[in-house]
């Protein structure tokens, strides 16, 4: 597939030989932060995370460049000052998400005090009927709290995880996200496929995200903020192949530090199994994500190179 050459100016030159060293350093840093985050209160973690995110943005010039470039065509009505402010908010959100995720045990002690649900009757109905479902999320708000939401709803599920490549770091991240109701499995393995099949056939809720441009998945081009974006067709494939409903689980931050997760039924069987339907479903799911982002644009990860892959023949 073609690539948008505009992203080349934001390319990061990283030595492949030093990759193990970088991952080991990341593991050391996260290990230290894990202890700190668990020792601090949730409000302190939130404030510290937002500060760290904004500080890192001052040095992450290429990530800032990616975000500003994408905002130039995704939200063209914003002026430069507004785009910079939105990027600062996005960076603060990512920093806060990191510290909240590391302090997940603090949220687990009393999740109802920090998490509120809207539209959960959609999930409760499927659970009562013994039906499995595909749950779609996006990288906005704090997606790392979703395992606790599963526990609050008393549902069980599985999510694929792209391994980073450093055993200790991967193990730590998986352990931090796993609980009695939620399992994380490495993406693209035989065990991953088996876990997905077992989850859906057993009435579980398989979790997926389709708001990123991933190189190693089968993509379709659908409209996203008025521009074609390479989007995984995996969600539509799973819905059609297993004949399961698709439910969104979209979260956002509230001014008081709490989190709200809203559920909506996006599609349900029967499906006609056609390629036209596959494209229509992928567009429907993507439009739902865009609608949520537009309501709280500062809570989405604008640093990801979302529109880098282009359709063949595009000017």
Image: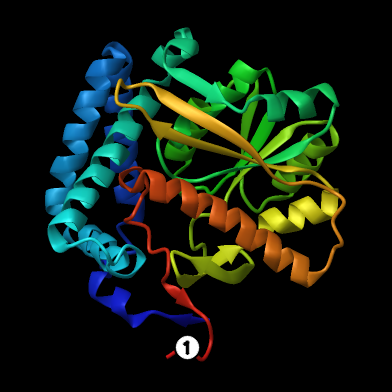
Can you name the residue that lies furthest to the top here?
109
Could you say which is closer to the camera, residue 66 or residue 292? 292
Q: Residue drawn 61% across and 28% down?
A: 119
Residue beneath disc 1:
314
Could you say which is closer to the camera, residue 23 or residue 88? 88
Q: Position of residue 271 (x, y in %)?
A: 84, 56
**Label 1 residue SS:** loop
From the viewer's perspective, is residue 255 above or below residue 189?
A: above
From the viewer's perspective, is residue 159 above or below residue 276?
A: above
Question: Badge 1: how crowded within 10 Å, few (<14), some, or many (20+)?
Answer: few
Q: In terms of image quadrants, where is residue 11?
A: bottom left
Q: In terms of image quadrants, where is residue 79?
A: bottom left
Q: Position of residue 107 (x, y in %)?
A: 42, 15
From the viewer's perspective, is residue 306 above or below residue 151?
A: below
Question: In this image, 232 relative to 199: left or right?
Answer: left
From the viewer's perspective, is residue 138 above or below residue 204?
A: below
Q: Residue drawn 23% across and 43% down?
A: 89
Question: In this image, 17 relative to 272: left or right?
Answer: left
| Residue 44 visible to an observer of this rendering | yes
């Amino acid at each position: 597939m073609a690539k948008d050459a505009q992203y080349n100016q934001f390319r990061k030159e990283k030595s492949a030989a030093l990759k193990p060293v970088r991952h080991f350093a990341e593991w050391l840093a996260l290990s230290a932060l894990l202890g700190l985050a668990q020792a601090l209160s949730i409000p302190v973690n939130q404030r510290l995370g937002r500060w760290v995110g904004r500080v890192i943005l001052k040095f992450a010039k290429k990530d800032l460049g990616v975000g500003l470039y994408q905002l130039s065509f995704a939200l063209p009505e914003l002026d430069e000052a507004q785009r910079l402010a939105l990027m600062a908010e996005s960076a603060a959100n990512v920093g806060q998400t990191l510290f909240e995720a590391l302090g997940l045990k603090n949220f687990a002690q009393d999740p109802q005090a920090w998490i509120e649900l809207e539209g959960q009757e959609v999930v409760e109905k499927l659970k009562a009927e013994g039906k499995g479902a595909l749950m779609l999320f996006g990288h906005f708000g704090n997606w790392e709290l979703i395992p606790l939401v599963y526990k609050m709803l008393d549902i069980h599920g599985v999510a694929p995880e792209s391994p980073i490549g450093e055993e200790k770091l991967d193990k730590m991240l998986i352990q931090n996200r796993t609980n009695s109701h939620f399992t994380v499995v490495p993406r693209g393995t035989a065990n991953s496929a088996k876990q997905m099949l077992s989850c859906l056939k057993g009435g579980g809720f398989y979790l997926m995200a389709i708001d990123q441009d991933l190189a190693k998945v089968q993509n379709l081009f659908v409209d996203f903020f008025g521009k074609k974006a390479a989007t995984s067709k995996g969600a539509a494939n799973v819905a059609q192949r297993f004949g399961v409903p698709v439910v969104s689980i979209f979260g956002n931050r509230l001014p008081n530090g709490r989190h709200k997760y809203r559920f909506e039924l996006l599609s349900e069987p029967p499906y006609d199994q056609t390629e036209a339907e596959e494209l229509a479903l992928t567009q429907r799911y993507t439009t739902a994500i865009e609608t949520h982002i537009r309501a709280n644009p500062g809570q989405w990860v604008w640093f990801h190179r979302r529109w880098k892959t282009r359709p063949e023949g595009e000017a």
